[in-house]
Image (cartoon, grey):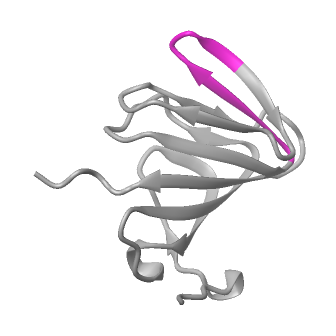
Amino acid sequence: MNVTRCDAAPRYHPPEHDGMACLRLQGHEAGPSDALWLGLSHLLPGGGTSLSASDVEKMYVVLDGEVVVRTDTGECVLRRLDSVRLAPGEPRQLVNRSNLPATILLAMPYPKRT
């Protein structure tokens, strides 16, 4: 068992993420994991990511607040406990357009080893 207390979770700073504070809950430097890692991100009003893609799927759950998810095919507003799955290679942008902070949970597999 690997327990990560939120108040002790390591911070990380992904590129092209502005106005966000990101914590590693499981995997990477937060502890062992064979298949995926979990992150917790707090988005300030106006904060978010660039429109970019990764080689692996991503799943987001909004824990608090409101987050706009934009892809090449459109956008949607996610609210508390709404979730979205993004396919490998699907560009996405997350934006907090509200005046209140938002919190999201990210689940993402490790890249495939070659």
Residue 23 located within the stretch drawn in magenta: no
Image height of 63 relative to 24, above or below? above
- At horizontal 87% and vertical 45% (from top left) the residue drawn is 80
Nearer to me, 46 or 73: 73
The percent coordinates of residue 33 (x first, y second) are 41, 74
Relative placement, left or right, of 98 versus 46 is right
Q: Quadrant of the N terminus?
A: bottom right
- At horizontal 28% and vertical 52% (from top left) the residue drawn is 111
Residue at the far top: name it: 73
Most prominent secondary structure in the magenta stretch? Answer: strand
The percent coordinates of residue 3 (x first, y second) are 60, 88
- At horizontal 73% and vertical 21% (from top left) the residue drawn is 76
The percent coordinates of residue 95 (x first, y second) are 68, 35
Image height of 108 relative to 55, above or below? below
In this picture, which residue range is highlighted in magenta? 65-75
- At horizontal 57% and vertical 47% (from top left) the residue drawn is 18
Query: How many numbered discs?
Result: 0
Nearer to me, 57 or 20: 57
Image height of 91 relative to 7, above or below? above
Relative placement, left or right, of 56 versus 62 is left
